[in-house]
Image: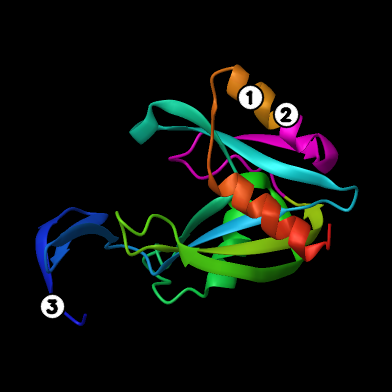
Amino acid sequence: MDEQLEVIAETKYLRLVRRGDWEFIQRSNATGVVLIVPLTDNDNLLFIEQYRPPVDSRVIEFPAGLAGDIPDAPDEALEAAARRELLEETGYDASEIKQVFSGPSSAGLTDEKTTFFIARGLSKVGPGGGDASEDITNHEIPRAQADNWLQAKTDEGCLVGARIYTGLYLLNRELNC
């Protein structure tokens, strides 16, 4: 199982590789992927909405991003990346951020793993909305209304990222619900 990787093609951000007969994608500019499930003190969830070109649609997601993708911080810790992405995308800082799970995002397509964090003790310290390459809309929704809100967004034509439901499960497990 320890077969050599053969690089088939490489771009600025992605690498297509082959291990045996299996071809898959690697990120060439990051060391990990982080996803943050932010919960406010008044039991609201923070969701983001942004256009995603691969699916040609606006997508509802939790804040997420890459670790180690900043040129002067290639060894960025996952928790530091989670804090940075939460602030960039939502404008919130967290007094408590806890890693609760890490696993493959799409094991047949990529070797990438997503590490999930629960963020609590949130305080608004910036505008959010992402960096210059992003056009993010923030939504703060009561946790008790999340399922209905997500369905309404689907009815409007948005896609809901599958990791939303993993994040909600992990949050409810953490809260013992």
The residue at the point 53 percent across, 40 percent down is: 161
Whether residue 127 sits left or right of residue 70 in the image: it is right
Label 2 Cα neighbours within 10 Å, binned few <14 / some 14-19 / many ≥20: some
The answer to whether marks 2 and 1 mark residues whose Cβ atoms lie closer than 8 Å is: yes
Residue 117 position within the rendered picture, expressed as x and y whole percent measured from the top left: 64, 64
Image quadrant holding the N terminus, namely: bottom left
The answer to whether residue 62 is visible is: no
The residue at the point 43 percent across, 67 percent down is: 32
Label 3 Cα neighbours within 10 Å, binned few <14 / some 14-19 / many ≥20: few
The residue range painted magenta reads 126-148
The one nearer the camera, 4 or 134, is 4
Residue position marked by numbered label 3 in the rendering: 4
Query: Which comes before the other along the chain, label 3 or label 1?
Result: 3
Residue 114 position within the rendered picture, expressed as x and y whole percent measured from the top left: 49, 62
Which amino acid type is shown beneath numbered disc 3?
A: Gln
Residue position marked by numbered label 2 in the rendering: 149
Is residue 133 on the magenta stretch? yes
Image quadrant holding the C terminus, namely: bottom right
Residue position marked by numbered label 1 in the rendering: 153
